[in-house]
Amino acid sequence: MSYQVVSNLEQVLSALKNRGENSRIIAGGTDLFLEKLPEKLLDISALAEALVIEERGGTMLIGAAVTHARAVASPLLAKKVKALTEACAQVGSPQVRNLGTLGGNVINAAPAADAAVALAALGAKAELIHYSGNTRTVEIEELYAGFNCSAIDSCQELLLRFVVNSSDSGSGSAFARLAARKSLALPLANAAAWLRVEHNCLQEVRLVVAPVKPAPTRLFKTESLLVGRPLIAESWREAAGAAMDEVEVRGSLLRCSADYRRHLIGVLVGRVLETAAGRALTAKGEA
Amino acid sequence: MQKEQICFTLNGETIEVYTDPTISLLRLLRDELGLTGTKEGCGEGECGACTVILDGMAVNSCLVPAGKAKNRSVLTIESLAKGDKYHPLQEAFVEKGAVQCGFCSPGMIMSAYALLQESSEPTSIEIRTAISGNLCRCSGYKQIEEAVLSAAEKLKNRGESG
Ligand SMILES: Cc1cc2nc3c(=O)[nH]c(=O)nc-3n(C[C@H](O)[C@H](O)[C@H](O)COP(=O)(O)OP(=O)(O)OC[C@H]3O[C@@H](n4cnc5c(N)ncnc54)[C@H](O)[C@@H]3O)c2cc1C
Ligand code: FES
Ligand code: FES
């Protein structure tokens, strides 16, 4: 067993390269530490390159090692990517939010991980670096191989940060979930929306819900129905209905029936759209 | 199991331990260092009984690998009393009847301690949020909330901050 706390990127890449298959990246450990641990752990929670929160030329850079608590505390994120702030604020408990990271939330690949759902709606892309030095940038959805199974091999590749386009004026986002309790409970369902408004109509919409598929699930049909619609209650009601028709959900004995989950997804979709639209209007007013 | 040297600050004192870095900080504190004030409830992040302060933040010590504490600062419930003088949080928990079986109390108090470091006049909602990761099976939480409010007042009157 060995445990190495790494502080710069070169260290991570050379450690992954030299130590082969039995060394694995760990961040907050809130998911990994409860599983069977590999021989060697590389702790990236203090890796400066993965801790950034900044806006550069119309793009938000959000480090994979940023904890939920730090994300919630960031005024920049609250202004630019509110759905993410709202999602992170609802993860687990204060103690879990102080440890758990955005990157871990996505790579752990739970189907309704809160931050992952918000990031997908925001159109975030993930920047990855392989130990060979190769880098690639992929959509959030491409990081999933199956239920609770990531497409990323965390013994070979580092998720460095997320990039989100923040240049669109008149856009807004929102996240909502329902769980059995307000803390220490995983969501029965969650939803996030990002949208852009022009002349009081929806111009672009990204709508994501979970748990439906292994990855956060875009509702493309419902999105296309919304484009061009005015920002009125009827649009949100129709979208809620369309979302319920579009999703194929499973029930679970532990949490709730499929019917209940479908209904819930409809309700959450209506809420996030309305909230995001309100924010888009406010953003326009400020611009 | 390969052991490593881990140097960190524990309750204000720099210490060095020789241990398996992949055991939990909770195990290290209780089993190897004999600090049994920190409790183990669930062992998986769900109850908060094991809450300690890591670099100023409340965390579940059952989820923290010992190796993560390297070069960092850990505060446990044992750090609060000064000699036989209890911390205002401890006094208030006793006075307000916030302790029944007492199993949740160390974790509850450490979560409240983290809050009082951040805000000296916490609102009810802030207190409820701060202890939302701590389960109590006895008290019903109301007395705990009152105790934290009362401790905040005591600290203010004494001109201290935690
Ligand atoms: C009590 C409790 C409650 C919880 N409640 C919620 C909740 O309400 N909502 C929710 O979404 N989640 C919840 N979680 C799950 C968990 O806290 C989050 O998913 C968290 O964000 C995981 O991040 P981490 O840094 O702790 O991941 P880790 O455990 O460190 O890692 C998770 C996985 O990702 C890999 N990994 C981590 N970072 C990287 C990286 N940068 N590059 C490559 N691989 C990486 C690791 O190898 C591992 O496979 C809860 C967990 C607990 C224990
Ligand atoms: S023992 Fe750590 S949270 Fe329950
Ligand atoms: S006093 Fe018994 S669990 Fe809280």
Image (spheres, coloured by chain):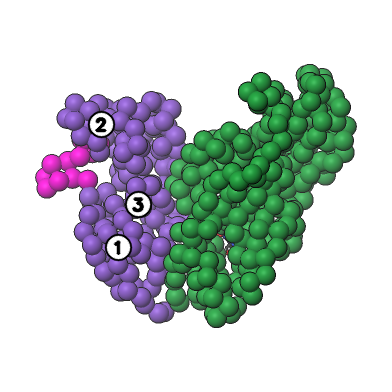
Chain colours: A green, B purple
Please tell me whether residue A124 is drawn above or below residue A14 in the rendered image.
above
User: Which of pointers 2 and 1 indicates the residue nearer the eye?
Assistant: 1
Please tell me whether residue A180 is drawn above or below residue A233 in the rendered image.
below
Span of residues in magenta = B80-91
Tell me where residue B120 appears, x and y as whole percent: 30, 30
Quarter of the image for residue B101 reads: top left
Left or right of B132 on screen, residue A19: right
Near mark 1 (Cα within 10 A), the count class, few <14, some 14-19 or many ≥20, is many
**Secondary structure beneath disc 1?**
strand
Tell me where residue A168 appears, x and y as whole percent: 71, 35
Circle 3: residue type = Asp
> Residue pushed farthest front?
A57
Q: Residue at x 40, y 70 (%)?
A: B21
Q: Is residue B92 visible?
A: no
**Mark 3 vs 1, N-terminal side:** 1
Residue carrying label 2: B151
Q: Can residue A56 be seen in this view?
A: yes
Chain identifier of the residue bearing label 2 in the image: B
Q: Which of A54 and B136 is in front in this view?
A: A54
**Mark 2 vs 3, N-terminal side:** 3
Tell me where residue A272 appears, x and y as whole percent: 70, 31
Residue carrying label 1: B8
Please tell me whether residue A201 is drawn above or below residue B48 in the rendered image.
above
Circle 1: residue type = Phe
Chain identifier of the residue bearing label 3 in the image: B
Q: Which mark is residue B55?
A: 3
Q: Quadrant of the C terminus of chain B?
A: top left
**Secondary structure beneath disc 2?**
helix
Please tell me whether residue A78 is drawn above or below residue A113 in the rendered image.
above
Q: Residue at x 34, y 47 (%)?
A: B56
Left or right of B78 on screen, residue A47: right
Circle 2: residue type = Ala
